[in-house]
Image: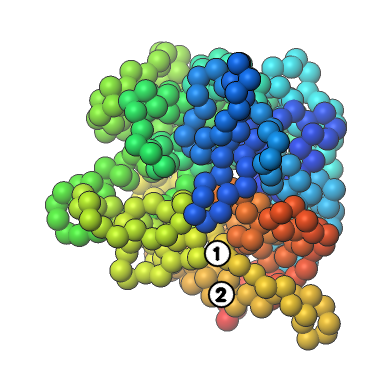
Amino acid sequence: MAFPEGFLWGGATAANQCEGAWDVDGRGPAETDMLTGGTVDTPRMLTYRMPDGTEGAVPQWDGLPKGAKLAVLDGYLYPNHDGIDFYHHYKEDIALFAEMGFKQYRMSISWSRIYPKGIEDEPNQAGLDFYRNVFLELQKYGIEPLVTMWHFDTPNYIEEELGGWENHDTIALFDKYAKTILTEYKGLVKNWLTFNEINNTISFLGMMAPATDEQFQGAYQHLHNKFVASAHAVKMAHEIDPSYKVGCMICGIVDYPLTPDPDDVIANRYMWEKSLFYCGDVQCKGKYGTYAKRLWDEHNVKLEITDQDLKDLAEGPVDFYTFSYYQSACVTTHTDAETTKGNMTIGAKNPYLTASDWGWQIDPKGLRYFLELIYDRYEKPLMVVENGLGAYDDLVEGEYGEMTVHDQYRIDYLREHVKEMEIAIEHGVDLIGYTTWGCIDLVSAGTGEMRKRYGFIYVDKNDDGTGSYARYKKDSFAWYKKVIASNGEDIA
Ligand code: P53
């Protein structure tokens, strides 16, 4: 049997994409509330208002113009405002997770539910209560929560008034938030993640349009401040409860050189350093890699790093490494290379792979490649905390008159990835958990769509905001239940 006893099978979601109730019970607005809906071809936009009253929108990841304030504008749809209304459906949803046999449920806490602006002295009690209730509900079924502290949703006030993560002072505000939740939920939570896909800040920069040195300066400072905040959270967690385990979370896009041209091979190596190792090394080893200086020099970046920061980084390496895995991409210096379609696609097209309807290249073997390489680099336990196929689903009437989705394509995708995890474990990788992304349909982070569905559970909500929010089991629901019950033996 490859999968170890106690392997943490389950599913994953994020507050901003599923909770809804964005302005309920004292919650403050977060950056993710100001993102519009997009499509496979058009990016989500971040909407804002300038001090002189002019309104505007920039593609997400591009950064706001100086002086802009995030704003909800007329004429746009903001899908995260309602999400799938997990805020009011969590009991029903957790019961369905339990029916599938989940051992672990990955979720995130919305910072602005706890500290609406981020700067208050006292936390918002209603926010604290909500997550306590969710944890108690999970406890009822013996499901272990895996809690992400930050999943893209910095409180607006911090973004607009304090300069967000580029400001070193934001670290102290995050410290306060982390300390609050680590203290409040002692005994209810064991495993924590600090920042979701922390590396996106640098790896997605310049994806829509070439980035300036100033943007690189901002992105690297942003990351440095998050590294320090993450190290603080690890240290605090261990002090508050020595049995707490804290992990990092990296967006694991596996890159291959497109050709054997040595320039491509070197470009690929440098891509790994910039996009994957830069963050993973600091969070796992407690210090910057040797190549960091080269990356900074490429864009004339001069970071504000204090001696205390370096000491804190060294004292706060994570206990385990987690990552998302959906796709691989190719790196090349040849400018005529073909790409796949889709507004969130990265790199060149791999002639040996097929792609999802959103242009993400499907590559189960890439998961094994990543697991083996990363385990060898850090020798820390690994968890795959996101994996799955975003696809169009058709809700149809099933055999017994119930509504369902025949999502064999999703089962096929997941099965092939489970097989590769099994091989990696046989090769000695210490893989301790697997949570599929969007175990219940939710709003896509990349496009804001509902129709890009990942779930075992279908949610009746449409891109125009209509729908009953009713939940239906897809075919993959029974399949995953069987996988978990057999601890990964029966994946047919
Ligand atoms: P969606 C791309 C863009 C944005 C977030 O993505 C991403 C990625 C994937 O590499 O990362 C994660 O919803 C993220 C989730 C997100 C999931 O991928 O664009 O942690 O929040 O929903 C899937 O299909």
**As shown in the figure, which amino acid type bears the numbered disc 2?**
Tyr
Q: Are marks 1 and 2 in contact (CB under 8 Å)?
A: yes
The residues bearing labels 1 and 2 have C-alpha atoms spaced at a distance of: 8 Å
Colour mode? rainbow
Q: Which sits earlier in the primary sequence, circle 1 or circle 2? A: 1
- What is the number of callouts on the image? 2
**From this viewpoint, is residue 433 visible?**
no
Q: Is residue 416 visible?
A: yes
**Callout 1 environment at 10 Å: few (<14), some (14 to 19), or many (20+)?**
many
Question: Which residue is nearer to you in this view: 310 or 451?
Answer: 451
Give the structural element (helix, strand or loop) at label 2.
Answer: helix
Q: What residue is drawn where x is 81% and y is 26%?
A: 124
Rendered location of residue 301, percent (x, y)? 32, 22
Classify 292 as above or below 193: above
Q: Which residue is mark 2?
A: 409
User: Which residue in the rendered view is the most extreme toward the left?
Assistant: 262
At 72% from the left and 58% from the top, the residue drawn is 462
Q: Is residue 59 above or below residue 156?
A: below
Residue 300 versus residue 383 in the image, above or below: above
Does ligand 1 reach within 8 Å of label 2's beta carbon?
no
Q: Which mark is residue 389?
A: 1
The residue at the point 50 percent across, 65 percent down is: 357
In the picture provided, is 219 more to the left or to the right than 243?
left
Mark 2: give few (<14), some (14-19) or many (20+) Cα within 10 Å.
few
The three-letter code of the residue at mark 1 reads Leu
Q: Is residue 184 left or right of residue 489?
A: right
